[in-house]
Amino acid sequence: MKIGNSSVIVITGASSGIGRALALALAERGARIGLLARRGELLEEVADDCRARGGDAAAIVCDVTSRASLERAVDETVERFGRLDALVNNAGRGHLGYIDDTADEQIESIFRVNVFSLWYGSAAALRHMRAQGSGLIVTIASIAGKIGYPGNAAYVAAKHAAVGFSRALRTELAESGIDVMTVIPAGVMTDWAAVAEGGPMLDLFVYEGERGRAIAAERGIDLPPALPLLGADEVAASIVGAMEHPVAEHYTHPGARELALLAESDPEAFERSQLPFWLANREGYRRERRGE
């Protein structure tokens, strides 16, 4: 799809992080954007910034874990701008907790935000896109939807589900005029890790990296190149380019596709290369839980 001043795009989780950066990048192309999130004041700020960059925006307070709320927000966008060209399922939340420490309510909460919302938003968007005979549904998944990581199994499982959802949706919409794309980012400089359910993750990530490299040196294990940490603006620019030329799965970070392919094609080699970090993560997690 060509993004311009006739394009109407809904973005969930648009008040911060990738969602905010994507809204601003699309606004620079002149797009009209339905900004959906829970934090109304922040949404209004994003909407003002979008208008300042040449686009238009509607700030719509929405709970993506509620089908009724998300349907209303999508319909409100269409009522204001007249059509719907793309939905970006971006809303998501991280989680910190080993499997035996994860409460039932946290599992359900993570799946409601990261998975259930995909059904709610996509079903609402499809009513309008089918009538038009065109559209694009983008799901922002994660490298955690391709690879397992310790300490946040609820999030990893949810993002694997997001990848599967998007793949199934592509089969249902083949040759319908409606395209489907999954975006696979890796580490992004946002507040995602700081506001994860179960507690902030930044200190654990730092410990895992430093201690993991030490364990690898002690054991003579060659580590693969680390994936770069990108800014939200860089990731947003990558997504905008992919939206104009959609593919089934778009990786935003250099080296991420290769790492995911290694994990799939040679899991034993992948596990050997990641073992120092997994051991360091477990060590750091236990230290945090003991308050050391």
Image (cartoon, rainbow, N blue to C red):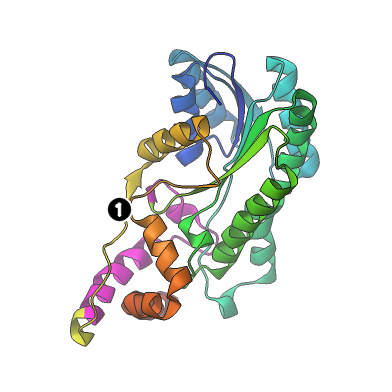
Q: Which residue is at a point 57% across and 49% down the rendered structure image?
A: 92
The reply to whether the magenta stretch includes residue 27 is no
The reply to whether the magenta stretch includes residue 214 is yes
Nearer to us in this view, 168 or 240:
168
| Position of residue 152 measured from the top left corner of the image (x, y, whole percent) | 51, 67
| Location of residue 38 with respect to 202 vertically, above or below | above
Q: Which residue is at a point 75% across and 18% down the rendered structure image?
A: 79
- Mark 1 neighbour class, 10 Å CA radius: few under 14, some 14 to 19, many 20 or more: few
Q: Helix, strand or loop at disc 1?
A: loop
Q: Which residues are magenta?
A: 188-216
Q: Which residue is at a point 72% across and 30% down the rendered structure image?
A: 74
| Location of residue 216 with respect to 154 vertically, above or below | below
Nearer to us in this view, 136 or 83:
136
Farthest-out residue, bottom: 219
Farthest-out residue, front: 175
Magenta: main secondary structure equals helix
What amino acid type should be assigned to the residue bearing mark 1?
Answer: Pro
Q: From this viewpoint, is residue 182 visible?
A: yes
| Position of residue 95 measured from the top left corner of the image (x, y, whole percent) | 53, 62
Residue annotated with mark 1: 228
| Location of residue 159 with respect to 267 vertically, above or below | above
Quarter of the image for the N terminus: give it. Answer: top right
Q: From this viewpoint, is residue 284 visible?
A: no
Q: Please identify the quarter of the rendering in which residue 107 is found.
A: bottom right
| Position of residue 273 measured from the top left corner of the image (x, y, whole percent) | 32, 76
Quarter of the image for the C terminus: give it. Answer: bottom left
Q: Relative to residue 78, is residue 24 drawn left or right?
A: left
Q: Please identify the quarter of the rendering in which residue 37 is found.
A: top right
Q: Which residue is at a point 44% across and 19% down the rendered structure image?
A: 28
